[in-house]
Image: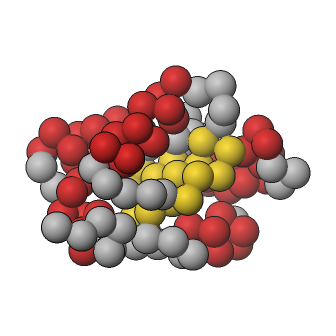
Amino acid sequence: MDRVKDLASKKAAVIFTKSSCCMCHSIKQLFYELGASPAVHELDNDSYGKEMEWALRGMGCNPSVPAVFIGGKFVGSSKDVISLHVGGSLKQLLMDAKAIWF
């Protein structure tokens, strides 16, 4: 849990993913299209990946990836991020965290 929180706080936008996850790819693309450069941590390529996956599940992220943090705060999974985007508040969250500037 501490490792996840530490990594999530090091950059304005952080996404925990798996390289084979299509929704992870979609969320990363959304952030890139909005002008953000998130830190991406692929759990299947990290030696602590399993432990971080369990920590994310413990935080309520089910499925465990993608797990999105903005400004060090857990935002949610793909469903939550897409809802924020459709509702018009994702861009503002990214601006408030200084992940993008407009």
Total count of labels: 0
Q: Is residue 62 visible?
A: no
Say if 4 sits above or below 88 in the image. Answer: below
Q: Quadrant of residue 92?
A: bottom left
Q: Residue at x 83, y 54 (%)?
A: 48
x%, y% of residue 22?
52, 24
Say if 72 sits above or below 4 in the image. Answer: below
- Left/right of residue 86 with respect to residue 35 in the rendered view: left
Q: Is residue 84 visible?
A: yes
Q: Residue at x 65, y 52 (%)?
A: 41
Q: Residue furthest left?
A: 88
Q: Residue at x 56, y 67 (%)?
A: 8
Say if 5 sits above or below 90 in the image. Answer: below
Q: Quadrant of residue 82?
A: top left
Say if 27 sits above or below 84 in the image. Answer: above
Q: Residue at x 44, y 63 (%)?
A: 13
Between 54 and 35, the residue placed more toward the observer is: 35
x%, y% of residue 15?
52, 52
Between 56 and 6, the residue placed more toward the observer is: 6
Quadrant occupied by the C terminus: bottom left
x%, y% of residue 93?
25, 64
- Left/right of residue 22 with respect to residue 31 in the rendered view: right
- Left/right of residue 68 with respect to residue 48 in the rendered view: left
